[in-house]
Image (tube, rainbow, N blue to C red):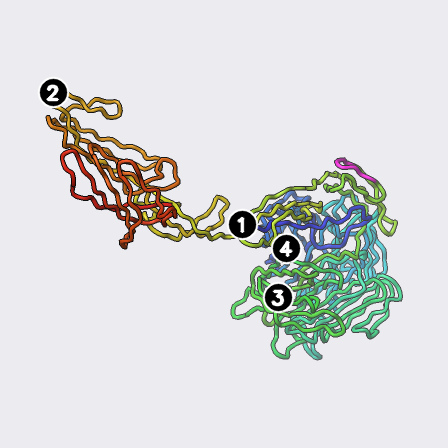
Amino acid sequence: MMLPFILSCLKPLGLNAQSFTTQGTDFWAALMPNWYGHDIDNYYISASGTRTCSVTVSNPNSGWTHTFAVPANSITTYQMPSDQCWEPNQFGIIDKGLHIVSTDTVQIWIYNQNGTPSTCDATQILPTSSLSNEYIVQSTPVDHCSTLQESRSQFSVLAPQDSTIVDLVLTNSTATGIAAGTSHTFTLNAGQILQVQGPLTSGDFSGTRVNARNCKPIAVFSGASTTSMPDVPSGSDISAGSADHTYQQNLPTAAYSTEWLLTPTAWHDTSDFVRITSKRNNCQVRCNGTLIATLNSGETYQFKLTSAAQITTSRPAVLYQYLDSRHSHLTGGDWGDVAMFAPNNANQKIQWCCFPTFPLLNRPNYDSKYYVNIIVPTAETSLLLLDGFPLTDYHPISGTAYSYSRHPINQSIHTIFTTGSGFSAYTYGLAENWEAYAMSLGGTDTATHISSNIEVTIDTGTCRGHLWWHDTLLLAPSTAQITVPDFEGICDSVYTIHLSAYPSYSDTIDSLTCFEQLLWDDTLLSTPGTYYFQHTTIHGCDSTILLNLHLKPTAERSLDTACCSDTLHIQQYALAVPGDHTVTLTNPQGCDSIIHLHVDALPRYNFLDTVYVNSNGEHWNYQGQQYSAGDVIDDTLITVMGCDSIIHITVLANTDTSCQHHLWVPNIFTPLLDGNNQFRVLSDNVTKMEVNIFQRWGDWVCTFDGLTEGWDGTKNSSPCPAGTYVYLIRYATPCQSNVKPIVGTITLIR
């Protein structure tokens, strides 16, 4: 048998910051204006996880809340009421922050669609644990858009905690006339959003610095109400062209990286744009090893992505990829519009993801296309499954050990899974002539750590009875509160740790198999004995198993037996007696045995006789009872072999009994078995008896005096074989010297 063991890696605690990840149980989100002048806004939230859970989304300032269930290994999408998500405000604080809490680990996406002009975009929402206090805004320029399309560069700052003081240094003027290059300070409470928009069709907030004092975490979102990317063909009027909404949660500077693997989107093979912003001065940017720019802190460089590429920087930076406007890629079809997303960095991977696709274009006679781009180590392409099937349309990324698939999908729920080291992916939808969205599918970057002065309660455990947490020894079980500085020495965090003692297990198992070998824990065992196995429990504790193995393969043997009845019943078989049979029997341990069975019939005696008594009142004694003339005796006796013998005696009156005689001849006997060792003839009123034994084909075996002797089953002192023999009995009575001989058969059983 094979015992299943669930293996789990328990990450060592005591780190002074948490790994950057898109998975969690607590999230904050802000929606942004999407094309002013239209009020048909659709706001969708999608959640997916590996275990069944419930997700609650709420506006803590209005009191609105809604809870929905998320099935295991699936996804749930819920359309939120627009009045709880946003309000038009070009520069100011609004109470529209959304708090999202799950009972188990999930990933969250939000989709913002304005149904009348068909403008939309989507973003993945970061968990609160991946938020930090410092951001450099990456927005979308709107300089090439018309006033008709209400195009404005914009960003929002959301506070998860009360009394969050936020400092801004603007790189662009605001719609309300606040000048670029000025600094401003705002105080936000939990769930409040600072919403900032630029002038109509002018500017770009990229490079704007946002900092929260006292290391408090904040969330930053950016993009444009609508925009065209990068511009329209020469001489064209953008009002006759296309513009679309862009919406993306920004990464904190603590999550910036130095390497990305980029792939072009479908129908935009050579027209996607990349914008990269540096955290530090003197940051060299390379594409496939070639230097393409050197940036100072906060500067942004934009370039066109013409093929799959490896982007590296000498200092931490952030990178966003943009689908271009529909007028920029007319060759081969006109699909999609502007969209913005944050590709995973090279270290950020995930092994399982269930993700949604969102509806596009509420217009007749227009179609939509959906895709997913997946990046995976080339050596692990065969280990990855999309909706349960492997992919074959991989393309290598030059100069790297990675390949990518750009695979079409339908508008549905989809799942990606790999047994390898992980994958990176993003998905997008393209509507015919206009409208598009794009979003990352997330992952965890264990090389990047996020710091903020958070207060965290952690329930964890240890297998060893103790745990070191940042140079503090904790004994299990116990509760402790520890203050931990972050890895940059700026922000302190307070951890309340509830430490449990996880058990280790040891067990001894007795196992019996009916086969010649047993597969146990990927080990083939073919010799009986005791084996030692070591496993890891779901909590990471060692577990030992001692296996006592007994091998009982299917046996085949021959047996001889005997039966009193005409039928022998063994398990499901009814066997004729006598006879030879082959049966398959199952023992109490479930093992089969093949038995070749020879069945003989044990002797049963039927005594049918008449006895005579004098008519003057004489009685006949049987088994201690007195019987008179006219009585009938019926009785059943059990032989020493356990077989029934039937007695039927009729008692009659007769004045002359001198010539009455009786013979009782058995039909079976068993030498060497107690009580029936010889073939003997019982008689009454017989004066002389000679018994001859012959084999069935006539050969003489022996002759003996039937009154004083019997046959022991031998011929000349040698045992005769089991079988049927013929007897010939000659005898005399007081009235007859030569009675007619009696001939019959006797069965010899061994």
| Magenta segment | 473-479
Query: Residue 580: x, y in percent?
Result: 36, 52
Task: State the residue position of label 2.
Answer: 616
Say what amino acid the circle numbered 1 marks.
Answer: Lys
Q: Is residue 732 above or below residue 534?
A: above
Residue ID at (87%, 49%): 490
Q: Secondary structure at mark 1?
A: loop
Question: Overall secondary structure of the magenta stretch?
Answer: strand
Q: Is residue 255 above or below residue 681?
A: below
Task: State the residue position of label 1.
Answer: 552
Q: Label 3 near label 1: C-beta < 8 Å?
A: no
Task: State the residue position of label 3.
Answer: 429
Numbered disc in front, either 1 or 2: 2
Task: State the residue position of label 4.
Answer: 523
Say what amino acid the circle numbered 2 marks.
Answer: Asn
Give how far apart the Cα atoms at labels 3 and 2 are. 122 Å
Query: Residue 276: x, y in percent?
Result: 79, 66
Mark sitting earlier along the chain (4/2): 4
Mark sitting earlier along the chain (4/3): 3
